[in-house]
Image: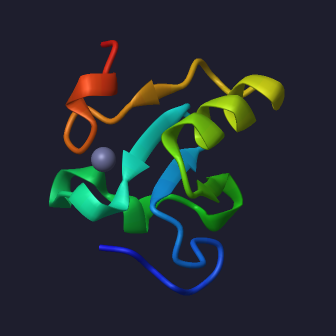
Amino acid sequence: MRKFNPPFNGNRYVLNKNTGEIHDLDRETELCHINDISSDHIYAGDSYMGCLLYAQSNHCPSPNGCFYCQPEHDNG
Ligand SMILES: [Zn+2]
C-alpha cells in the first residue's frame, strides 16, 4: 500500500539503502516489513529503474527485487 508521508511521498517503489532490496508498494506483503525499515535507509522513487540507478550511483549493496513483492526482479 502506498504511503503518502515522508520519506515515501506516494512513490510506488522503495529502496532499502542498507540492504539494496527494492519493494513495490502496490504489491507489498506483510513479509516485506516496510514499516521496519529505518526512514534513514529509505529511497522512494516512481520506477524500479530509478531505485536501481540510485542504488548503483550511491554505492548501496547490490540492488535486488524483493522476493515477496518483486519476484521477477529477485536475483537471489
Ligand atoms: Zn517487498
Image quadrant where residue 64 sits: top left
Q: Measured from the top left, where is residue 28 in percent x and y?
A: 25, 58
Q: Position of residue 14 (x, y in %)?
A: 51, 53
Q: Position of residue 45 (x, y in %)?
A: 61, 56
Residue 31 against residue 48 in the figure, above or below: below
Indicate the colouring scheme: rainbow
Say if 9 sits above or below 51 in the image: below
Q: Pick the residue in front: 47 or 62.
A: 47
Q: Does 26 sit above or below residue 1?
A: above
Look at the image and tell me whether residue 66 can be seen. yes
Q: What quarter of the picture does the N terminus occupy?
A: bottom left
Q: Residue at x 82, y 31 (%)?
A: 58
Out of 20 and 50, give the one closest to the viewer: 50
Q: Quadrant of the C terminus?
A: top left
Query: Closer to the camera, 46 or 54?
Result: 46
Quadrant of residue 74 within the rendered picture: top left
- Count numbered badges in the picture: 0
Q: Going 50% across and 40% down the picture, which residue do you hit?
A: 48
Q: Residue at x 65, y 54 (%)?
A: 43
Please say whether residue 18 is visible from this viewpoint.
no
Quarter occupied by residue 69: top left
